[in-house]
Each structure stands twice: as structure tokens, then as C-alpha cells.
Image (spheres, grey):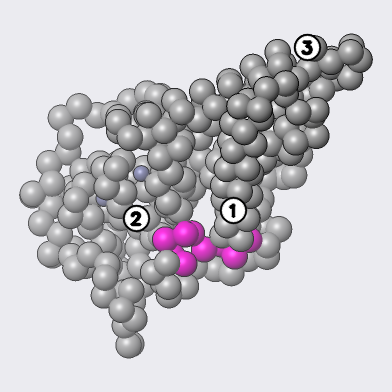
């Protein structure tokens, strides 16, 4: 079989014999499965805090500068409630996207016992990540910021200080949708009293509007085509089953379709399947 360049890019330790499991001691402290996921990356933390500040700033300006001085009380109440709900949803989905394990592969699981437990048949190979000493499931990629291999990694987003992967893509999409709607609301309100505020708001609003609409578009495209951002960039050969667009949406948002799709508090069910083996 002719191998594509992307194939050759993958890690070279392909056969169990070359995996050197003795070099991969399991980590001394086993990470607790219920421990909160949080990436200690200065740049990501700063970007995350900036995002929260921008949402709070928008909430403050809309409530106290735009709506409170407005003469129509009903107008102010309805719009204030709508804007605050969207701001709350944006912050909640941001927090869930940031603090949900995106699908990390257990660190240092490339041990002799684990490889033996996979019971590889002839023709089946496993990949080892030399950076985090883990057995890489199919479609997993190593993230240098998270220092872990992430299943179905799309990209590392500093704005949510986390990777966007199999388990938190729903929250990331909800975050882009709620910020986008927030910004659309923004431009329907009457302009604030001072020019400086207006310039600030328009700048922030436009920036967010462009950023979130581009992000939302690329996310929906990658979900529908079932091809992560990295796979599109690397032009990886498709080894996985092709499903309909609707099925792909259901995989990310958890099935079946319900109002829970829009809730940042409902965790989608991804099942327990781990695909470690590759057939060549
Ligand atoms: Zn890795
Ligand atoms: Zn990452």
C-alpha cells in the first residue's frame, strides 16, 4: 500500500516490539477521574480572563448605559433579561469548554501490560506518542500546550484555555453561538451617550462578531464532514466510517435531539469506545 505523506508524519514506533514499554513507567500518582480539568497555561488563562471581562463589560454597558436611561421600562426589562440570559449562557458554556476534559488519553499508558491487554492480531499496529508516552487511539493528536494526546483534537483554543476535542466540542460551539447572539443584540440597542463608549463597543462587537461567526462556521463544517481542523490541515487519509451530516451532529451534541443540545449544563453521551488499533 502506498503511504501518503501524512501517514509518514505519524510517529514511527508502530509495532509492539518497537514500543519500548519498559521506558514508559506509569505515572506515580494516578490522576483521579473526577478531578477538574484545567490547563495551567499563562497565555490561555490571560485570554480566558479577557473573554470574561469583555462579556462583563458588555453586560455593564448594555444594562447601565443603554437600557437603564431608556424611557420605556418594558423595553428595558425585556431586553435586559434577554441580554443577561445570553451573557450567562456564554459564560457557562465558556466555563464548561474550559473545564471539561476534551478527550485526553491517559498519560504513560504505553506499558507492557496495557499493550498485552490490547491482544493485537497480526496486521494490527498501535501508535505510541513519544511525547506523553501514551498509546494513541485513532484520530488522536498530541497537544503541546495540554501536554497530552487528545482524541479527535480540532485545535487548541487559547480563548477557552483548552483543546477543542471529542468531549467538549459541544460547549465550544454553544459558546460561539451565544457570543454571536449577544453581539447581534448589541447592535439593535440605541447607541450609548458618549462617543468613546460607542467606539469601544462597536470595536468589541465587530471583533467578536467576526471571530465567533468564523469559528462557528468552521466548527459546523468540521462536525458535518466529520473531519477535525487538524485532519483538514494535514489532509489525512480518511480511515473512519462515513456518516450522514445529521448523525455527525448527534455524535457531538449527544443523541437523541432534545433541548439539552442547547444547554451548556447537559453533558453529551459519547459512549466508551476507544479505538487503539489500526489495520494496515
Ligand atoms: Zn502525546
Ligand atoms: Zn491543547
Disc 2 packing (10 Å; few <14; some 14–19; many ≥20): many
Badge 1 element = helix
Question: Residue 31: x, y in percent?
Answer: 28, 29
Badge 2 element = strand
Residue 82, quarter of picture: top right
Q: Judge whether residue 225 can be spotted in this image.
A: yes
For the residue pair 133 and 217, the one nearer the viewer reads as 217
Q: What residue is rendered at 37% in x and 29% in y? A: 45
Q: Which residue is mark 2?
A: 141
Residue behind label 2 places its C-beta within 8 angstroms of ligand 1: yes
Q: Is residue 3 above or below residue 241?
A: below
Question: Residue 257: x, y in percent?
Answer: 75, 44
Query: Marks 3 and 2, Cα distance to the nearest angstrom?
Result: 49 Å
Question: Residue 117: x, y in percent?
Answer: 27, 51
Q: Which residues are magenta?
A: 224-232
Disc nearer the start of the sequence (1/2): 2
Q: What residue is rendered at 59% in x and 38% in y? A: 203
Q: Is residue 83 above or below residue 253?
A: above
Q: Which residue is mark 1?
A: 214
Q: Which residue is mark 3?
A: 68
Amino acid at each position: 500500500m502506498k503511504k501518503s505523506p501524512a501517514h509518514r508524519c505519524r510517529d514511527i514506533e508502530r509495532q509492539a516490539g518497537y514500543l519500548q514499554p519498559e521506558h514508559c513507567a506509569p505515572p506515580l500518582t494516578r490522576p483521579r477521574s473526577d478531578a477538574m480539568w484545567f490547563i495551567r497555561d499563562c497565555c490561555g488563562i490571560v485570554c480566558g480572563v479577557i473573554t470574561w471581562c469583555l462579556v462583563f463589560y458588555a453586560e455593564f454597558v448594555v444594562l447601565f448605559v443603554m437600557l437603564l436611561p431608556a424611557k420605556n421600562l418594558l423595553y428595558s426589562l425585556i431586553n435586559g433579561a434577554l441580554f443577561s440570559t445570553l451573557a450567562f449562557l456564554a459564560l457557562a458554556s465558556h466555563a464548561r469548554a474550559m473545564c471539561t476534559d476534551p478527550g485526553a488519553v491517559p498519560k504513560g499508558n504505553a506499558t507492557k501490560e496495557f499493550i498485552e491487554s490490547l491482544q493485537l492480531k497480526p496486521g494490527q499496529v498501535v501508535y505510541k506518542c513519544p511525547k506523553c508516552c501514551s498509546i494513541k487511539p485513532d484520530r488522536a493528536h498530541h497537544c503541546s500546550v495540554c501536554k497530552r494526546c487528545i482524541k479527535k483534537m480540532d485545535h487548541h483554543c487559547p480563548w477557552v484555555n483548552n483543546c477543542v476535542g471529542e468531549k467538549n466540542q459541544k460547549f465550544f460551539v454553544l459558546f460561539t453561538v451565544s457570543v454571536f447572539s449577544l453581539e447581534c443584540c448589541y447592535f439593535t440597542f440605541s447607541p450609548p451617550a458618549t462617543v468613546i463608549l460607542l467606539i469601544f463597543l462597536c470595536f468589541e462587537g465587530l471583533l467578536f462578531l467576526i471571530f465567533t461567526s468564523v469559528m462557528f462556521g468552521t466548527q459546523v463544517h468540521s462536525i458535518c464532514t466529520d473531519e477535525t481542523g487538524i485532519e483538514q490541515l494535514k489532509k489525512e487519509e480518511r480511515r473512519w466510517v462515513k456518516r450522514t451530516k445529521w448523525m455527525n451532529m448527534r455524535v457531538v451534541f449527544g443523541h437523541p435531539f432534545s433541548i439539552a443540545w442547547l444547554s451548556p449544563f447537559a453533558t453529551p453521551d459519547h459512549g466508551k469506545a476507544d479505538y487503539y488499533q489500526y489495520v494496515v
